[in-house]
Amino acid sequence: MLIKDGIPTAEDLASVCPSEERLAKGPIAITECFQNIACNPCTKACPQHAISMEPDINALPKVDPDKCIGCRVCVAKCPGLAIFVVDMTYSEEKALVTIPYEFLPVPAKEQMVTGLNRSGEELGSFKVNRVTSGGKTNMTWMITLEVPKNLAMEVRNIRVGV
Amino acid sequence: MIREVEVMVIGGGPAGLCAAQAAASAGAHVLLCERDGVPGGQLVKQTHKFFGSERQYAGDRGIFIGQRLVQEVRENPNIELLTDATVLGMYEDGVVTVLKDDRHLKFRPKKTIVSTGAAEKFLSFPNNDLPGIYGAGAVQTLMNVGGVKPADRVVMVGAGNIGLIVSYQMLQAGVDVVSVVEAAPNIGGFLVHAAKLRRAGVPIRTGWTVKEAYGEGKLEGVILCQLDEKWQQIPGTELDVPCDTLCLAVGLTPLAELCWQAGCHMEFIRELSGHVPVTDENLMTSVEGIYAAGDVSGIEEASSAMVEGRLAGYAVAVSLGYDTENSQKEVDAARKELSELRSGPMGGKIRAGLAKVAEKRGEAVC
Ligand SMILES: Cc1cc2nc3c(=O)[nH]c(=O)nc-3n(C[C@H](O)[C@H](O)[C@H](O)COP(=O)(O)OP(=O)(O)OC[C@H]3O[C@@H](n4cnc5c(N)ncnc54)[C@H](O)[C@@H]3O)c2cc1C
Ligand code: SF4
Ligand code: SF4
């Protein structure tokens, strides 16, 4: 349970997971942010105004599936590193998952890295599809991975090298 | 010689920097004393991105927030910043003494804002004096200010925000964080911080504590054990974890000695993490002209420390007659901002603490 060990439950995840229908349409942001904390940079970051928070700063963020275009801007902005972008339309077998990353070394495009789940367990070796810097002062990297579709909701971190 | 000053701010953390900036931008002359060589307080070692709203620079890394506040203060001609200047005493006749470059300086401020922040708590268990057992603040300073890798294999005690954040920063520095243990049944810090540690492979054990540490001349390992609902150690649950460092993040307590010395009405308020000066809605203590802002009046956050600093700074400006109309507006705006920051479930503890402060204030008046 999240509050005991830091691992969100299936129930937690179900509350933020977009519908199959929406996932089939293209990339979308998923906010794995389950606690009422005074925080709102995600709402300000989104150029599409797709993330809302009602009634105030302590509410949970909510992604509007019709407004979000999966541009990934919010991924680096979130101080909790709690936003991921999943694209189920990448290819027949593979999905793209974008995660925020703040460790060295930063992997290169095309490099194989170890994918980890929400408990830090290894899920396999995956190819880096894209690497984007969050900028000089933000300093969070956005790493996009190619993963089998059945792992798109599992892979949430990477380990680079051994 | 005693130098007269208009406003003295003690401590150059987020609260003090914002207090100085507020009072000075209304027109007051401010002397800001910081005991460290570099102003910024806790912010100088916070390499992670902060929470809160835009007004408190949320999403920016703490260290950059600090740099921005310091720069504003340095650019303000109404502020005189003294670094390496430790305030030693506040006396009944209004004199404040400062140690600077081995010299003992004396000032008589019209108004004083105390923003000295907090000190770390420690934990008692057998062998807790072994080299290799540190407070989280020391580890963070070594790592993020000194650029020194503080450990190879560490166990962190405390799953509040500090324990979680410092653990994450140690991972970033290449340290093997074996486990985070927390005596309480639940994680106290933000769950997004916990999740980010967990998915990097760090187990978080709630309901566990350190039974004892061991080692010949230096720390070689710790015995962890599980606690029952009454916080009693459960025999047979002992776990031997080899490590070279044990890091304690078991809370902070207000650094309020100067307020005691100045004769401020002090009360022990558990929710605010220790003895705090009883302040009014302008953050003035029971001693006329002495204000307290930031962690010194209750352990909270940098976001609220900044707003409290601003509130106290403008309240001082009002009392000195500087730009009173606008300053009063700023005071009101800061109050509103604070109540918004504290309105959520995570603010419950602070709200309860502040309600007790208000109660104590009422008692003192009658
Ligand atoms: C690991 C960690 C992570 C944190 N993360 C966050 C976060 O993500 N978001 C957030 O909002 N907050 C965070 N905080 C909390 C935040 O840093 C503090 O709440 C905030 O710094 C308090 O501000 P302050 O100005 O009251 O005190 P401080 O920052 O402690 O500053 C007090 C200053 O006073 C000086 N001083 C003390 N005594 C004297 C004296 N006698 N004479 C002269 N100077 C003196 C000290 O040297 C210090 O510079 C974190 C804290 C820690 C330790
Ligand atoms: S991915 Fe882009 S459009 Fe979607 S919520 Fe994030 S910032 Fe907005
Ligand atoms: S910015 Fe991140 S941590 Fe803050 S509310 Fe949004 S999703 Fe949650």
Image (tube, coloured by chain):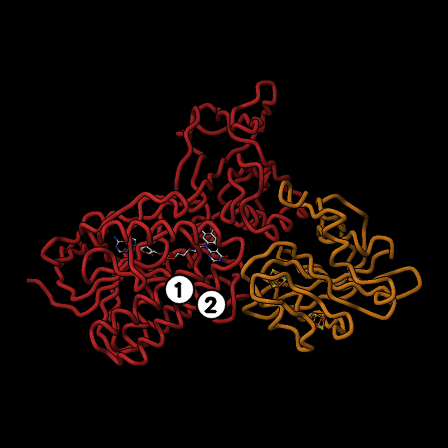
Chain colours: A orange, B red
B60, B331: nearer the viewer = B331
**Hey, what amino acid is under mark 1?**
Met
A39, B124: nearer the viewer = A39
Contact, mark 2 vs mark 1 (Cβ under 8 Å): yes
Q: Residues within 10 Å of mark 2 (few under 14, many from 20)?
A: some
- Of labels 2 and 1, earlier in sequence is 2
Judged left or right of residue B42, residue B23 is left
Please state the horizontal and vertical placement of residue B50, each as a whole percent of the image.
52, 61
- Determine the residue positioned at 86% across, 62% down: A20
Image quadrant in which the N terminus of chain B is located: bottom left
- Determine the residue positioned at 40% across, 36% down: B122
Whether labels 2 and 1 belong to a single chain: the reply is yes
The residues tagged by marks 2 and 1 sit, at their Cα atoms, a distance apart of 7 Å
- Determine the residue positioned at 25% across, 74% down: B318
Q: Residue furthest front?
A: B366
Residue at mark 1: chain: B
Please state the horizontal and vertical placement of residue B323, each as a whole percent of the image.
26, 81
Q: Which residue is mark 2?
A: B56
Q: Is mark 1 within 8 Å of ligand 1?
A: yes
Please say if A44 is above or below B300: below
Q: Residue furthest right?
A: A92
Q: Is mark 2 within 8 Å of ligand 1?
A: yes
**Hey, what amino acid is under mark 2?**
Gln
Quick one: SS at disc 2? helix
Q: Which residue is mark 1?
A: B306
